[in-house]
Amino acid sequence: MILVNTDYITGKEFEMLGLVRGSTIQSKNLGRDITQGFKSIVGGELKSYTDMMNNARALATKRMAEEAESMGADAVVNIRYASSSVMQGAAEVMAYGTAVKFK
């Protein structure tokens, strides 16, 4: 499966199959939240939150690719990511793009 954030793949002609997406909602761990709160007092990267968001993006991307594969796609083009707060302490990460089949 080819995944790109451009709206084309050099040298490939394709037909569009449609929108595909994958998402996950992650919540903060209370213990992690307390330690990261202390870290925010002195400043610097909140590494455990960075790791959590990296994992969330990877899972959303995997789910998007699985949806594309179920449609018979060869690639997903024009991939984008979005995130939003769902509730206090929980955020959604979504990956979306256009599933395509090579001609």
Image (tube, rainbow, N blue to C red):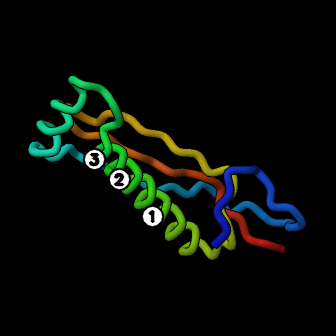
Q: Secondary structure at mark 2?
A: strand
Q: Are marks 1 and 3 in contact (CB under 8 Å)?
A: no
Q: Residue furthest right?
A: 11
Return the residue nearer the eye: 35 or 11. Answer: 35
Few, some or many residues within 10 Å of mark 1 (<14, 14–19, 20+): many
Q: Residue 24 got which mark?
A: 2
Name the residue rendered at 67%, 51% in the picture. Answer: 5
Q: State left or right for residue 10 relative to residue 65.
A: right
Cα separation, mark 2 vs mark 3, equals 17 Å
The quarter of the picture where residue 35 lies is top left
Q: CA distance from mark 2 to mark 1?
A: 9 Å
Point out which mark residue 12 bears.
Answer: none
Left or right of 32 in this view: 4 = right
Q: Residue at x 30, y 38 (%)?
A: 46
- Where does the C terminus fall, quadrant-wise? bottom right
Q: Residue at x 15, y 47 (%)?
A: 29
Above or below residue 49? Residue 16 is below
Kindly identify the amino acid type of the residue bearing the numbered disc 1.
Arg
Disc 1 to disc 3, how far (Cα)? 23 Å
Q: Are marks 2 and 1 in contact (CB under 8 Å)?
A: yes
Q: What kind of residue is marked 2?
A: Thr
Along the viewing direction, whichever of 55 and 71 lies nearer the viewer:
55
Q: How many marks?
A: 3
Residue type of the residue flagged with mark 3: Ser
- Residue 18 percent across, percent down from the top left: 64, 58
Q: Earlier in the sequence, mark 2 or mark 3?
A: 2
Q: Which residue is mark 1?
A: 63
- Which residue in the structure is indicated by mark 3? 48
How many C-alpha atoms fall within 10 Å of the one at disc 2: few (<14), some, or many (≥20)? some
**Crowding near pointer 3: few (<14 within 10 Å), some, many (20+)?**
some
Q: Is residue 67 above or below residue 47?
A: below
